[in-house]
Image (cartoon, rainbow, N blue to C red):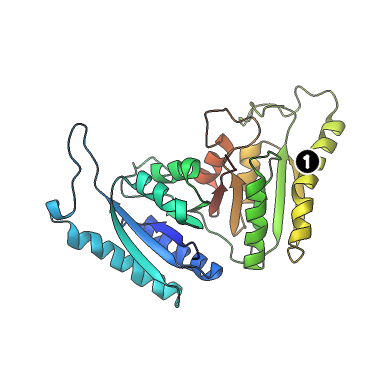
């Protein structure tokens, strides 16, 4: 059975936009679309509640009906199922992601605070989900490339494979970007921080970074010969450089973690920055555990 694309819906404009994108992704992949709405929470020391208990049943199914109608409009022919599940959204969608090929969420939800650029559900799924997560944001260019953030880490190999497969599906060029600077751990990336400290041989370091980029993409170019690949080595601050290159792209793909990640940190700072600030949708791909 083909694993579906799933979309989490809470009735917000952002989540309905995610349904629209998810429907197109399902059509592109030839998979079904599953629309999921989670309800209820368990107060401290109290029982969980249900829509029926609070007269919310019509509203809940109204949200899903509207989302399903939108999906059929933008992607005719895609099989759509919808589900109402009791539980916190982060828990429900994490479970749903176990049997999905792709999860799609909006960048904000109804529960978001006014100053919060990215909903907690999206952050949690990027770190803990069992399938790639696409966060819908920005203004993608349908004719633009798929951009791959290459970090050279073993955990990032899944992102490389996913990006090549996406470029092939979309018949789009792939821009593989590796950003480097002379700070070995990229600790200094503020706007006023120097780029030229802590280096004995910048030319040798540049050659090593180029080799890292080449090794990351060469094997996959052989497996996806139909994909045109541009390799781009950029000396800059990692987060800002990737945010900049996302402008004009149709999709940006990154691993959940990269070099320099802390052992207990499941979502790296670069991935978080892209989810918050990229100019196009971002897909985060977790590595093998």
**What residue appears at the point 23 percent right and 39 percent down from the top-left corner?**
42
> Relative to residue 182, is residue 146 depicted above or below?
below
User: Furthest-bottom residue in view?
Assistant: 77
Relative horizontal placement of residue 16, taking residue 275 as reference (left or right):
left
- The answer to which of 80 and 145 lies nearer the viewer is 80
Look at the image and tell me in which quarter the C terminus lies. top right
Res. 36 in view = yes
Res. 145 in view = no
| Element marked by disc 1 | helix
The total of numbered circles placed on residues is 1
Relative horizontal placement of residue 39, taking residue 126 as reference (left or right):
left
Toward which corner of the image does residue 211 lie, by quadrant?
top right
**What residue appears at the point 29 percent right and 68 percent down from the top-left corner?**
65
> Relative to residue 195, is residue 226 depicted above or below?
below
Q: Where's residue 207, x and y in %? A: 85, 37
Q: Where's residue 96, x and y in %? A: 41, 53
Relative horizontal placement of residue 70, taking residue 229 as reference (left or right):
left
Q: Where's residue 39, x and y in %? A: 26, 50
> Relative to residue 183, is residue 36 depicted above or below?
below
Toward which corner of the image does residue 80 lie, by quadrant?
bottom left
- The answer to which of 101 and 246 lies nearer the viewer is 101
Toward which corner of the image does residue 227 lie, by quadrant?
bottom right
> Relative to residue 90, is residue 99 depicted above or below?
below
According to the picture, the residue beneath numbered tag 1 turns out to be 212
Q: Where's residue 173, x and y in %? A: 70, 62
């Amino acid at each position: 059975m083909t694993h579906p694309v799933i979309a989490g819906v809470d009735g917000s404009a952002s989540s309905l936009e995610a349904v629209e994108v998810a429907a197109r992704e399902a059509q592109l992949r030839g998979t079904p679309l599953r629309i999921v709405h989670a309800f209820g929470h368990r107060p401290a020391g109290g029982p969980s509640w249900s829509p029926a208990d609070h007269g919310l049943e019509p509203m809940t199914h109204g949200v899903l009906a509207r989302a399903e109608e939108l999906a059929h409009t933008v992607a005719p022919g895609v099989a759509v199922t919808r589900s109402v599940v009791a539980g916190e959204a982060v828990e429900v969608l994490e479970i749903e992601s176990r049997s999905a090929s792709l999860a799609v969420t909006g960048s904000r939800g109804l529960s978001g605070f006014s100053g919060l650029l990215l909903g907690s559900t999206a952050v949690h799924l990027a770190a803990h989900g069992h399938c790639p997560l696409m966060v819908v944001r920005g203004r993608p260019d349908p004719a633009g490339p798929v951009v791959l953030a290459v970090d050279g880490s073993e955990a990032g190999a899944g992102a490389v494979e996913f990006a090549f497969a996406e470029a092939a599906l979309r018949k789009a060029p792939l821009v593989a970007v590796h950003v480097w600077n002379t700070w070995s751990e990229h600790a200094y990336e503020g706007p006023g921080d120097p780029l030229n400290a802590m280096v004995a041989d910048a030319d040798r370091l540049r050659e090593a970074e180029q080799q890292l980029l080449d090794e990351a993409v060469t094997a996959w170019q052989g497996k996806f010969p139909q994909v045109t690949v541009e390799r781009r080595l950029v000396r800059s601050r990692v987060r800002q450089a990737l945010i900049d290159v996302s402008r004009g792209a149709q999709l940006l793909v990154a691993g959940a973690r990269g070099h320099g990640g802390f052992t207990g940190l499941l979502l790296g700072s670069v991935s978080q920055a892209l989810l918050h600030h990229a100019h196009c949708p971002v897909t985060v791909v977790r590595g093998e555990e």
